[in-house]
Image (tube, rainbow, N blue to C red):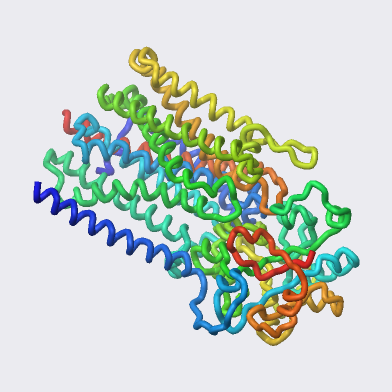
Amino acid sequence: MFEKALKGNNYYWMWLAFLGFFIVVAACCYLRQYFYGLGLTGMTRDVSWGIYISQFTFLVGVAAGGVMLVLPYYIHNFKAFGRITILGEFLAIASLLMCMMFIMADLGQPLRGLNVLFHPTPHSMLFWDMCVLWGYLLLNVLCGWVILTAERKQTHPPKWIYFFVYLSIPFAFSIHTVTAMLYCGLPGRHFWLSAIIAPRFLASAFAAGPALIVVMALILKRVANFDAGKEAIDKIVTIITYAAIANMFFVCLEFFVGFYSDIPGHKHTLQYLFFGLEHHGHIYNNLVPFMWGFLLLFLVGIFLLACPRTRKQSDLWLGIGCASIFLAFWLDKGIGFVLGGFVPTPTEEIVEYYPTFNEIFITIGVWAAGFFILTILYKIAIGVEHEIEA
Amino acid sequence: MDTNRRNFLKVAGLTTLAGLGGTAVVDRLVTGAGVAQASAGESHDTEQAALAKPGATRYGMVIDIKKFHQDPSLGEKAVHACHQTHNVPHFPDKRDEIKWIWMTNFENAFPEQANLYQNEESATKKLPLMCNHCDNPPCVRACPTKATFRYDDGIVGMDYHRCIGCRFCMAACPYGSRSFNWRDPRPFIEHINHDYPTRTRGVVEKCNFCVELVQAGKLPVCVEAVGDSKALVFGNLNDPNSEIRKILKEKHTIQRNPSLGTLPSVFYIV
């Protein structure tokens, strides 16, 4: 089926070349980082994880979000999702590959990465995260490929594949739960030490992942003559709306616990993220614009999705709504959550983090690589669809 | 109806079993971080000691803050000796900073003991900070490769050749004791001590209680550096007759953030 990715119009090749440019830039930046060390990033001993790990955290959510198509289709037999479950599965593959790239970019000694396998350590959550991420990646590759091949031959998929399809559903939940456990099990980091982190991660994932799928579906409708179907889009939008609201509900709960209990440790990071934190006469607030951007984009997005006129009348407004939700939750989890957790430091100091250009270019390049893979996968999937229709 | 009931009972039974099994697994996961040791059968008088892992040896340190306040040169000596011995680099840029032991303010060392009206001495003078060598170390729990681990004698060590540089331990340490080699440290070491390895870029490091000296029967270099001042006293916490235990019996000491249950092995006389 790969041959389908080799035939395309000019726009297709221009788009791939555009992404390829950023990938090449990132590869050069990565080589610089590889030979110099992570000192080329903005990280310090006080803010020891930066945008690599925060992108990783967000993208695990995007990968898990695909399950919101798989679950209704296979468990509830919601037929309208039949055409687009493959979009969810392929999005999961691309996101997981981005996750792996971000992890590799973040390792101080990437060549020793296999030590996690050579010295398996069940009491480390990172070990389990590796297990579930690889598991979910392989499951999606297997299920996506087998089902697409069957579709192409216009036969029913083999019975055994359903075992793996059903297995992939708890795996989707587990990848984001275990990723949350990387953070919420650490003593002394008050902002992360909260039982609501895992549900909050899942809620924002189930909004951001499907939101990206809707945006993709709307683009594919214009550029690839692929219609996901009105009923399917409507249902995904309902899922996004509820999941997005659940995430904001959880954010409000965090605020309540912090500010009503009035325990300084529980408030500091929220203050730092949303209002700026005063310390020895200086106000630290470099993440404040991002967090207010998050709230604003959420409000714009939820309005466009909830209001029947904007949702139903125009694909453009629907697309902007979904893109707003996606961006909002990227700001929330892909910027604020990880970076904010390091403020203040365990010794009650405040060190702010600013990514360097080298780091930003690597990050952009990994995203570009993800979209490169996604474009190719979607090209194959849609090529198969068109072949059947023809 | 009957089959429904039977099915329900089956599911309920299985779920209960799974739940019981699950807690056992979680218990193992959580306690798995340490090295299992045979009980020494010693009776402990405090709750903390009862929680601590039994064993013949558990090294610890008592830091007399008063003495560091009286003679600020003691701190400099300890830091210098440690960093010299362990090839700790000195970077011009603070963002690259690596430190094993350092002097800081009381409010930074004990943020959970915040006091609106600090006495002048605590507010202005410095005290040393280092790895606490916790008996229940969160860094060891978090490390995905066992590159940081607890020796049988309670010292929390590092294997610089196994560390993959994921920095999970740095996020896990509630005391900010760990540093990362953001770049090649070797050009920034003033005098290389060939008895201790230098590190490569991309690995984590921290105070190791001079495990290489202690296990050869010597004292940590910071303790040696402060000489007879007794500002730093090192010894076996599990030996009731050791000097360190005598001091702990006589003087009121505090630990950094004990509420986290990490059981630090470093005690401070305020």
In this rendering, would A141 be left or right of A212? left
Q: Is residue B192 above or below residue A288?
A: below
Q: Is residue A175 visible?
A: yes
Q: Quadrant of the C terminus of chain A?
A: top left
Q: Is residue A175 above or below residue A322?
A: below
Q: Is residue A274 above or below residue A160?
A: above
Q: Residue at x 62, y 75 (%)?
A: B45
Q: Residue at x 54, y 63 (%)?
A: B164
Please identify the quarter of the rendering in which residue B42 is found.
Answer: bottom right
**Front-lying residue, B134 or A76:** B134
**Residue A22 coordinates in the image, percent (x, y):** 51, 39
In this rendering, would B263 be left or right of A155? right
Hey, which residue is sitting farthest left in the picture?
B2
**Residue B65 coordinates in the image, percent (x, y):** 81, 65
Q: Is residue A141 visible?
A: no
In this rendering, would A202 be left or right of A221? right
**Front-lying residue, A359 or A167:** A167
**Residue A294 coordinates in the image, percent (x, y):** 54, 30
